[in-house]
Amino acid sequence: MTIAYASTPITDRIMRLSDGSDVCTYLVVGDKRALLVDTGYGFRGLRSYVESLLQGKPYDVVITHGHVDHAAGAAEFDTAYMHPADLELNVRHTTIEFRRAMLSTTSAELIADISDDAFVPTRSDFLPLEDRQTFNLGDLTVCLFHVPGHTQGMMVPVVLEERVALFGDACGVGTLIVFEEASTVTEYRESLLAFKQHEGLWDRVLRQHGTCESPKSILSTNIELCSLIMACEDDAFPAEFAGMKTLMAKAVDPVSRARIDGGEGNIMYIEEKIR
Ligand SMILES: [Zn+2]
């Protein structure tokens, strides 16, 4: 199977790019420059696809966090930005073995007959990102907020003129607060509360998995779920991720993973990560 890239317009100046896997990336296009947000699992060809869309317009590449499904394609580009707190995580997550292991659980048919040469190598020389770093694309401005929790280097780009926030894995329908790179739920709540002070900047929330979009209220919902977890008043619904026994703050349908109560927003955690 070969990788077939495709793009979907989200607004006049934001495109969602897909490669057939379970994660998408975004291309934000101003009148002077563009910004690629994330690079997927690192299949070769993303760069030429992006450049075919941009037709010579200069661009930068930012990585929202160091997980395999967001950072692994960075080596195909001349430069890429990522928060320094995720550098070590990126190296651990972007080996070819780790990519294949993750893809085999989410997109097995995609990698069934592709060789290791189809993947770009691991990148280690990232340019640093810091809280509220801004990229000027001409008629568009993208401001990246540092929202640690899912990982320590997690960044959320906000496209100011479009009033769109790209939440990535920072806050979603099953935010993972499970592994060593994650904060505690207590710390995560503080981080979301600090980020919420800026929510006047966006009307629309895009994500990189599943439906790839959520109501703006998902941020407040996940803050409330953190409080419930800390008070042991959540559903503590048994779940599993990558062979690890976990808990979901709100009970979900085992097949669709949607909340049984119909709400949007959820947190997957382990007891050791509450405080
Ligand atoms: Zn992630």
Image: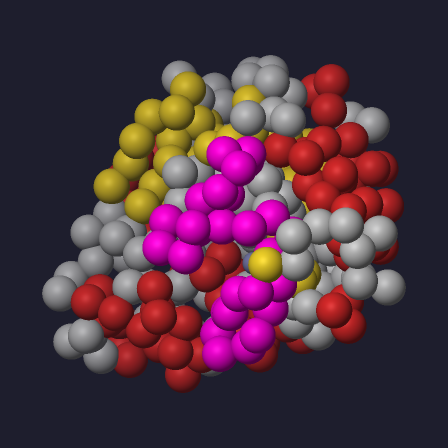
Residue 57 in which image quadrant: top left
121 in relation to 59, above or below: below
> Would residue 259 be counted in the magenta stretch?
yes
* Residue 69 picture location, percent across and down: 46, 61
Q: Residue at x 41, y 57 (%)?
A: 254
Front-lying residue, 251 or 275 = 251
**Which secondary structure class fits the magenta region best?**
loop
Residue 198 in which image quadrant: top right
Q: Is residue 204 visible?
A: yes
Q: Is residue 142 visible?
A: no
Q: Residue at x 75, y 40 (%)?
A: 223
> Would residue 255 be counted in the magenta stretch?
yes
Q: Which quadrant: the C terminus?
A: bottom right
| Magenta part of the chain | 238-264
Relative placement, left or right, of 159 versus 122 is right
Q: Residue at x 32, y 73 (%)?
A: 104
* Residue 60 picture location, percent across and down: 53, 43
Residue 45 in which image quadrant: bottom left
24 in relation to 42, above or below: above
Front-lying residue, 163 or 128 = 163
* Residue 271 picture location, percent across and down: 74, 69
Q: Quadrant of ligand 1?
A: bottom right
* Residue 33 picture location, percent across and down: 50, 30
Q: Which quadrant: the N terminus?
A: bottom left
Q: Residue at x 65, y 52 (%)?
A: 235
Front-lying residue, 39 or 251 = 251
